[in-house]
């Protein structure tokens, strides 16, 4: 059972010393101890990726407040379902996704608070607050300040600490038919997953490693990976799929080249996008450059020692800069991992 694995697992002594992670205080959690959360403990998370997503998730987890996640691709009907089924009392989202809520809030009576990250237009905030008289709209900083100012009785925090069987999150996916399906994940599931990943892969990590996060946190793959990085104290920067490579942006470097991560996790479609972006840039340099590149890649694939080293130093050094200092790349999620992308 997952909870037994979590209960019996102990963190091995690492071969390197994890650096302390700069993590702001979790005053957010105090806010979730106030009504209506004493009776309705669920919160819904509607953005794709951000450091504040993780901060709020940890705050909720520390006091047994279950979170539910939803993709923006679910649409208004799917979001409504993911709010109503677990009776969510609050919703956290990015400012650019707030307009979607205008069509959702009239049909989600349990939602009392909307917390946003970013800078929406003031008129939009007024429209959201006007949907129902009992809805309060707060920025992430306002939430933090309310949490700091909250008065919590002695013993309340300890009484709300999660147990292995406590539900940590409900991840909603579109499913093949019908309404979105919620996958229930306990704290024991998360702890067991992090422990397993660290046990199997921890010895591959070094103090100089850095991780680039860009996949949706509403997906269990990215959520578990980021928990693992926090666990070992690895520096993490948040990017976006649309800004990963130089080919995806203008007048600046892509996220990979700028941050130079050594560890990345992706899905097949993302690796193929990276490969095509690099190949497209090479081809734009002309026939000669493209031919040299193809020859160098073929030499590396065949394991030709002298030619391979020459290809590394003369041809591939410039191309390799596009992937920063990447040394560990893992692929997960659905879909077939194209052979071309994997070998590349």
Image: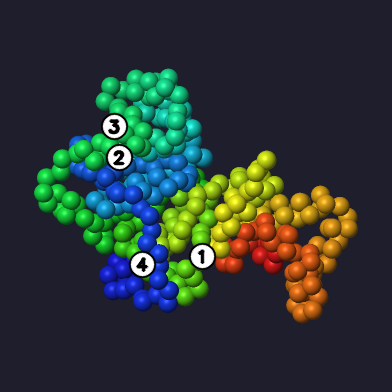
Tell me the element at label 3: loop
Residue at image location 70% in from the left, 64% down from the top: 344
Image: 109 above or below 229: above
Q: Residue 202: horizontal and vertical position, in percent?
A: 45, 72
Q: Nearer the viewer, residue 83 or 325?
A: 325
Q: Residue 134: horizontal and vertical position, in percent?
A: 26, 25
Q: Residue 21: horizontal and vertical position, in percent?
A: 38, 58
253 sits left or right of 106 in the view: right
Classed neighbour count for the residue bearing mark 1: other residues with Cα under 10 Å, few (<14), some (14–19), many (≥20): some
Mark 3 → mark 4, Cα distance in angstroms = 33 Å
Q: Which of 215 and 248 is in front in this view?
A: 248
Residue bearing the label numbered 1: 209
Mark 1 → mark 2, Cα distance in angstroms = 31 Å
Whether tag 4 and tag 1 are in contact, CB under 8 A, the answer is no
Of labels 1 and 3, earlier in sequence is 3
Residue bearing the label numbered 2: 144
Of labels 4 and 2, earlier in sequence is 2
Q: Residue 325: horizontal and vertical position, in percent?
A: 61, 63
């Amino acid at each position: 059972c997952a909870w037994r694995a979590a209960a019996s697992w102990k963190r091995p002594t690492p071969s390197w010393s994890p650096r302390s992670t700069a993590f702001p205080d979790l005053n957010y959690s105090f806010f979730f101890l106030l009504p209506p959360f004493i009776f309705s403990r669920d919160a819904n998370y509607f953005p794709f990726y951000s450091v504040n997503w993780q901060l709020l998730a940890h705050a909720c987890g520390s006091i047994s407040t279950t979170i539910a996640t939803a993709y923006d691709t679910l649409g208004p009907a799917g979001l409504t379902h993911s709010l109503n089924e677990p009776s969510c009392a609050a919703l956290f989202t990015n400012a650019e996704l707030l307009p979607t809520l205008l069509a959702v809030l009239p049909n989600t009576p349990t939602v009392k608070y909307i917390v946003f990250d970013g800078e929406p237009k003031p008129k939009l905030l007024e429209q959201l607050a006007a949907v129902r008289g009992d809805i309060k709209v707060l920025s992430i900083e306002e939430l933090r300040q309310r949490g700091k100012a909250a008065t919590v009785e002695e013993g309340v925090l300890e009484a709300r600490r999660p147990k292995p069987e406590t539900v940590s999150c409900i991840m909603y996916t579109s499913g093949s038919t019908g309404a979105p399906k919620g996958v229930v994940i306990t704290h024991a599931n998360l702890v067991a997953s992090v422990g397993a990943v660290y046990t199997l892969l921890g010895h591959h990590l070094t103090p100089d490693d850095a991780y680039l996060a860009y996949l949706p946190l509403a997906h269990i793959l990215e959520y578990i990976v980021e928990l693992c990085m926090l666990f070992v104290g690895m520096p993490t920067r948040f990017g976006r799929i649309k800004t990963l490579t130089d080919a995806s942006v203008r007048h600046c470097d892509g996220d990979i080249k700028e941050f130079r991560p050594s560890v990345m996790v992706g899905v097949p479609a993302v690796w193929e996008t990276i490969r095509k972006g690099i190949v497209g840039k090479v081809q734009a340099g002309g026939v000669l450059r493209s031919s040299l590149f193809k020859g160098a890649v073929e030499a590396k694939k065949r394991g030709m020692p002298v030619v391979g080293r020459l290809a590394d130093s003369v041809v591939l050094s410039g191309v390799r800069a596009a992937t920063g200092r990447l040394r560990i790349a893992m692929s997960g999620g659905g879909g077939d991992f194209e052979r071309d992308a994997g070998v590349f």
